[in-house]
Image: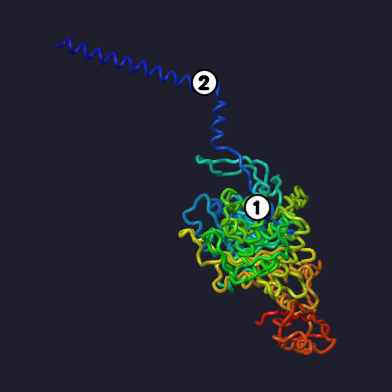
């Protein structure tokens, strides 16, 4: 029994010795490491520790502005101050017995916060408390000055900046917006984020365990060195405003889902306006429920263009010399079978020339014209017009549309594409392709940015107009312009786009929308009109697209009037309205009066300073001379349904400049029946062979 006890004791003793040895070895190792770290590696470990709580931070001192083509600010960065207090420093002491009372009184006075509410903000706070964020600079400066004058301690002023958009909804999808830390999230703000952001000195900062900045050392906000660039757009704010206003009217009058409009310079491809409705206020973008409103429809909407595509179809056929404007085709009284499908026109037509096919917008005529082209030739023209391809546009989110591969172009597919079905495009693609048809055949790179400038407004990079390729000849372009002018005549589909005294051309479109669930066409339509002016030397191209109008779906009735109103205001803006358009000028004057009274345009007077600058530079004649009503020579007689001889007999000889358009009987006059007419005024008389 004793032997067993001795054995147990021996084992315990041996284990104890092992533990002592191991523990001694461990403590010796720890002592060795402590000595080594303290005496030999202290600098390395102190540096490592320093990295844990110290670091660098880049201060967002500012961000480059975004301007329109005339250097009107569209996006700007505004300095603010955030006011906070250190409660333990705020408390009154023997040295400063009224410190807290003075602080509360002065803060309440400048920040418009009651002293009771200020005390609530301090409840339970001992080290730090926010009082108010984003205090305007002028208010914070007055506040700080009075606090210093009264020798008040414990109030802290932290500099910060906020991105602001002076004109609210104006060009919102183009400009885009920034998020936290002033990072661009949409539009130009996103595309040129690196150019716009402030590149400044790195500052030393203290950070917590989660690497959040707690304090910036030696921080003087006003003296941070750095640089940034600014963006100058091709957009003209005034034209953008007119476009948005008229588009909004068009959408609301037709009770449509939405709409868009693009105004482009015909010779350079510069985009003067790109509007859509409904839109959103850039200053309150987080409040927008439908986030799709962020996207520019001009580059993201993919749709079948319908009859507007006939312009490119006819241009290709004429350029290949397989047809002329006078080539005739039987349009089969509006019903024609291709394969197992029936192609229909909106109105029955017999034999039409190519010019009439375009004017009356015959689907059957367009497909018969395109059958004279080889498939690969027509396909090449479609691709040369850049359909199915993206542009080098400085805006994110651009779609390329859809053009089926050539191997899928059978007879039916080619026939459908001839009148704008079976092909999907973006509004910008259609506008740019159409522009090439009427500008002499040059497909231009669409321009949205004019230049990049630095903080001193010195040019860093200039974006020059670029010809991508020559698509059609000058001769073909001239023929197309003449034919497109007839579309806007009394016998065409777009008479509501006409402007007295200005030669206008264009093309209507009524496109069926595809039902994605049933994989077939729905009863919903997209109505559009794309036009240009003047015919002699095209300067402006305007596309108007109205999505899902509730009443008529014809582009000539829905979209053409919107085109006309935008065009008239552009002409007036550039002093190019005919002298006899007094009533139209009067209407425009009422709109400029609306601008003068600062209605419906947030900060328009403050940021554009429109009227003052316009009157100085002569960009827009606010004081448009208008004939007074009592100077009218006569009342416009009713000459409707008369032949030209009887119509002429209704006017006093030699008093008016009578201009005749067409033959047959009178169908329309400008001015209209019953309106005032004046000595020397031009009176337009439109005639047609068909009675109304």
Q: Position of residue 483 (x, y in %)?
A: 72, 66
| Residue closer to the observer: 316 or 446 | 316
Give the residue furthest to the right. 654
Task: Using the rendered view, name the quadrant where residue 513 is placed.
Answer: bottom right
Q: Which mark is residue 36?
A: 2
| Residue closer to the observer: 255 or 371 | 371
Quadrant location of the C terminus in the rendered image: bottom right
Residue position marked by numbered label 1 in the rendering: 374
Of the numbered discs 2 and 1, the one sitting upstream in the chain is 2
Side (left or right) of 311 relative to 520: right
Q: Position of residue 75 (x, y in %)?
A: 67, 57
Label 1 sits on a secondary structure element that is loop
| Residue closer to the observer: 420 or 9 | 420
Residue drawn at the location 77% of the way across and 50% of the way down: 459
Whether residue 376 is situated above or below residue 490 in the rendered picture: above
Q: Residues within 10 Å of mark 2 (few under 14, many from 20)?
A: few
Quadrant location of the N terminus in the rendered image: top left
Give the residue furthest to the left. 1
Q: Nearer the viewer, mark 2 or mark 1?
A: 1
Distance CA(mark 2)–CA(mark 1): 87 Å
Whether residue 114 is situated above or below residue 666 in the rendered picture: above
């Amino acid at each position: 029994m004793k032997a067993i006890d001795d054995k147990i004791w021996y084992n315990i003793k041996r284990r104890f010795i092992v533990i002592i040895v191991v523990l001694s070895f461990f403590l010796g190792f720890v002592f060795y490491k402590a000595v080594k770290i303290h005496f030999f590696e202290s600098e390395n470990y102190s540096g490592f520790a320093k990295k844990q709580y110290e670091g660098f931070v880049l201060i967002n001192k500012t961000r480059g502005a975004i301007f329109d083509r005339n250097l009107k600010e569209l996006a700007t960065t505004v300095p603010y101050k955030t006011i906070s207090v250190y409660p333990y420093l705020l408390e009154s002491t023997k040295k400063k017995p009224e410190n807290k009372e003075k602080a509360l009184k002065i803060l309440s006075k400048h920040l418009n916060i009651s002293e009771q509410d200020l005390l609530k903000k301090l409840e339970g706070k001992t080290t730090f408390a926010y009082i108010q964020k984003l205090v305007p600079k002028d208010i914070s400066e007055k506040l700080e000055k009075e606090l210093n004058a009264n020798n008040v301690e414990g109030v802290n002023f932290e500099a910060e900046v906020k991105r602001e958009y002076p004109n609210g909804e104006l060009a919102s999808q183009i400009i885009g917006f920034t998020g936290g830390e002033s990072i661009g999230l949409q539009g130009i703000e996103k595309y040129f984020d690196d150019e716009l952001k402030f590149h400044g000195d790195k500052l030393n900062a203290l950070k917590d365990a989660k690497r959040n900045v707690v304090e910036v050392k030696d921080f003087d906000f006003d003296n941070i060195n750095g640089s940034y660039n600014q963006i100058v757009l091709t957009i003209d704010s005034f034209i953008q405003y007119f476009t948005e206003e008229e588009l909004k009217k068009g959408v609301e009058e037709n009770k449509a889902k939405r709409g868009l409009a693009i105004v482009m310079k015909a010779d350079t491809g510069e985009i003067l306006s790109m509007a859509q409705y409904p839109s959103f206020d850039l200053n309150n973008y987080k409040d927008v429920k439908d986030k799709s409103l962020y996207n520019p429809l001009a580059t993201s909407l993919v749709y079948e263009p319908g009859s507007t595509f006939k312009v490119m179809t006819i241009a290709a056929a004429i350029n290949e010399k397989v047809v002329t404007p006078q080539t005739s085709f039987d349009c089969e009284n509006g019903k024609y079978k291709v394969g197992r499908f029936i192609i229909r026109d909106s109105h029955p037509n017999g034999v039409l020339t190519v010019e009439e096919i375009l004017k009356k917008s015959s689907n059957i005529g367009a497909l018969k014209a395109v059958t004279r082209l080889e498939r690969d030739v027509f396909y090449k023209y479609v691709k040369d017009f850049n359909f199915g391809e993206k542009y080098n546009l400085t805006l994110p989110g651009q779609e390329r549309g859809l053009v089926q591969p050539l191997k899928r172009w059978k007879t039916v597919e080619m026939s459908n594409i001839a009148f704008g079905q079976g092909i999907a495009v973006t509004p910008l693609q259609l506008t740019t392709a159409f522009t090439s048809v009427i500008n002499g055949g040059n497909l231009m790179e669409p321009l949205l940015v004019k230049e990049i400038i630095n903080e001193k407004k010195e040019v860093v990079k200039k974006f020059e107009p670029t010809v991508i390729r020559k698509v059609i000849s000058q001769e073909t372009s001239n023929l197309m312009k003449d034919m497109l002018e007839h579309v806007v005549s009394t016998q065409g589909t777009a008479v509501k786009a006409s402007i007295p005294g200005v030669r206008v051309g264009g093309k209507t479109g009524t496109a069926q929308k595809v039902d994605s669930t049933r994989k077939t066409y729905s009863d919903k339509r997209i109505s559009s009109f794309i036009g240009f002016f003047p015919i002699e030397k095209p300067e402006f191209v305007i596309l108007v697209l109205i999505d899902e109008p509730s009443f008529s779906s014809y582009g000539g009735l829905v979209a053409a009037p919107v085109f006309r109103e935008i065009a008239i205001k552009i002409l007036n803006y550039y002093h190019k309205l005919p002298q006899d358009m007094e009533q139209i000028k009067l209407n425009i004057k009422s709109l400029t009066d609306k601008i003068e009274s600062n209605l419906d345009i947030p900060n328009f007077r403050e940021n554009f300073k429109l009227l003052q600058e316009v009157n100085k530079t002569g960009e827009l004649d606010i004081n448009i001379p208008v004939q007074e009503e009592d100077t009218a020579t006569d009342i416009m007689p009713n000459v409707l349904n008369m032949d030209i001889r009887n119509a002429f007999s209704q006017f006093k000889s030699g008093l008016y400049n009578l201009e005749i358009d067409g033959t047959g009987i009178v169908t329309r006059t400008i001015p209209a029946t019953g309106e005032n007419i004046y000595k020397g005024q031009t009176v337009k008389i439109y005639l047609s062979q068909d009675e109304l």
